[in-house]
Image (spheres, rainbow, N blue to C red):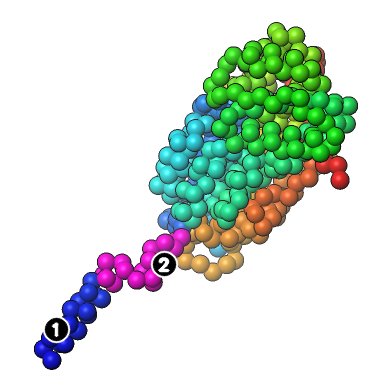
């Protein structure tokens, strides 16, 4: 009997110890629950997660400009009788996946309840788990790879996706009479390899032939061997989904190698840094055209944003020394406005304090007319967009430092 009593006591002690040390399903579930970040006081922090250095620094800075301008126009939001100041917390993810995780963690530590960015799908994908695990929603501006939002309920985006963009450019190539295409992509870069893959698949399905498929390493600067191989395959066009930095290096080498094939690219090439005599004839897809007067929201934005750029020489420097409105700046503005409208929608609801999970739930229902078109997210968090703008570089561009609009392009059904 004494032995039985002693055994019962031991069992009870073990049970108490297990619960106290976090054992059992219920405590574990509580520990893993996403609670998010709560706003204390009357300042709401929104993170700006962008590359301002590295190979994508030029484009990242243009997205930052769009977000900064949006914050200048809408610096506060009224919710349930309280006026909250909106503070941007900017970090540089350095165009690097490892640095991106560190940058994302620093935003979480700073107490942001929403994040904008990033330019570059690879860094966005790398930081995705950090934002999701913290319960903080992110709105990507121009990160076009499907993996950014796939399986992540806390990542949204304001741009179209690469399956659409790759198919758009394949349709454009076929419509221009190109039958044989070469492709050059960057090893290990989610955007470059992903977009290249979608282009190749669509081009071949439309009856075209990929006559050369070449890759290069990150930070590579000599493309002569690749271009020699491509020249030998005699393509009608070359599709190069790359960074702006790579574009400025490869274009003069294409000229030097005597290649007369049409050069095509994706949205990353919309930066005035590539406007040169070697770039004349280049065609690329993008999200927006500042001369499109069909959208009154866009017209108002263009006017105000140009004034914003010209008000500070630093802004012009960050914008490749021009006041041309880059599509990614417009997307930076729209991404900020998505979070702003989510916060605005909390007015009239009952809650103790604003929480990042609450902001995420509001983003699901956001719908508004943006600079780049109607912004509404589907079940994956992706903006519902079906039109791309095709732009080119002409001789006129060399003096104006402006790309020329060719046409809108959708996907042939």
- Snapshot quadrant of residue 372: top right
Residue projecting furthest to the bottom: 1
x and y percentages locating residue 169 in the rendered image: 78, 33
Residue 124 lies within the magenta run = no
Residue in the foreground of this view, choosing between 319 and 76: 319
Q: Which mark is residue 6?
A: 1
- Residue at the image point whose x is 65% and y is 40% from the top: 144
Mark closer to the chain start, 1 or 2: 1
Residue 31 lies within the magenta run = yes
Q: Is residue 1 above or below residue 72?
A: below
Determine the CA span between mark 1 and mark 2: 32 Å
Labels 1, 2: front one: 1
State which quarter of the image contains the C terminus.
top right
Q: Is residue 92 left or right of residue 199?
A: left
- Residue at the image point whose x is 49% and y is 32% from the top: 96
Is residue 37 visible to us here? Answer: yes
- Residue at the image point whose x is 56% and y is 32% from the top: 188
State which quarter of the image contains the N terminus.
bottom left
Label 1, residues with CA under 10 Å away: few <14, some 14-19, many ≥20: few
Label 2, on which residue? 29
Residue in the foreground of this view, choosing between 255 and 102: 255
**Which residues, given as a range, are shown in magenta?**
18-35
x and y percentages locating residue 339 in the rendered image: 59, 50
């Amino acid at each position: 009997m004494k032995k039985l009593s002693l055994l019962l006591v031991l069992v009870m002690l073990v049970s108490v110890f297990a619960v106290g040390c976090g054992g059992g399903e219920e405590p574990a579930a509580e520990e893993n629950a996403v609670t998010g970040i709560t706003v204390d006081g009357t300042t709401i922090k929104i993170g700006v997660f962008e590359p301002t250095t590295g190979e994508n620094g030029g484009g990242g800075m243009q997205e930052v400009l769009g977000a900064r301008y949006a914050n200048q126009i809408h610096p506060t939001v009224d919710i349930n009788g309280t006026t909250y100041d909106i503070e941007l917390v900017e970090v540089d993810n350095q165009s690097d996946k490892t640095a991106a995780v560190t940058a994302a963690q620093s935003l979480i530590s700073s107490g942001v309840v929403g994040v904008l960015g990033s330019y570059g799908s690879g860094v966005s994908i790398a930081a995705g788990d950090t934002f999701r695990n913290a319960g903080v929603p992110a709105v990507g501006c121009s990160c076009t790879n499907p993996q950014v939002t796939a399986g992540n309920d806390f990542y949204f985006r304001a741009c179209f996706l690469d399956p659409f963009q790759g198919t758009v450019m394949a349709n454009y190539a076929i419509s221009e009479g190109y039958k044989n295409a070469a492709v050059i992509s960057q090893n290990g870069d989610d955007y470059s390899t992903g977009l290249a893959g979608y282009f190749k698949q669509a081009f071949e399905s439309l009856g075209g032939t990929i006559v050369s498929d070449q890759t290069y390493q990150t930070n590579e600067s000599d493309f002569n061997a690749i271009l020699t191989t491509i020249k030998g395959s005699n393509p009608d066009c070359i599709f190069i989904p790359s960074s702006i930095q790579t574009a400025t290096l490869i274009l003069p080498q294409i000229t030097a190698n005597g290649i007369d094939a049409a050069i095509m690219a994706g949205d990353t090439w919309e930066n005035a840094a590539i406007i040169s005599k070697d770039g004349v004839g280049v065609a690329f897809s993008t999200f927006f055209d500042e001369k499109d007067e069909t959208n009154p929201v866009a017209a108002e934005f263009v006017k105000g944003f140009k004034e914003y750029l010209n008000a500070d020489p630093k802004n012009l420097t960050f914008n490749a020394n021009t006041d041309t409105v880059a599509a990614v700046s417009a997307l930076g503005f729209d991404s900020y406005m998505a979070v702003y409208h989510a916060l605005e929608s909390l007015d009239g609801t009952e809650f103790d304090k604003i929480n990042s999970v609450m902001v995420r739930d509001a983003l699901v229902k956001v719908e508004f007319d943006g600079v780049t078109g109607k912004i509404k997210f589907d079940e994956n968090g992706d903006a519902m967009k079906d039109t791309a703008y095709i732009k080119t570089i002409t001789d006129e561009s060399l003096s104006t430092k402006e790309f020329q609009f060719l046409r809108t392009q959708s996907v042939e059904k």
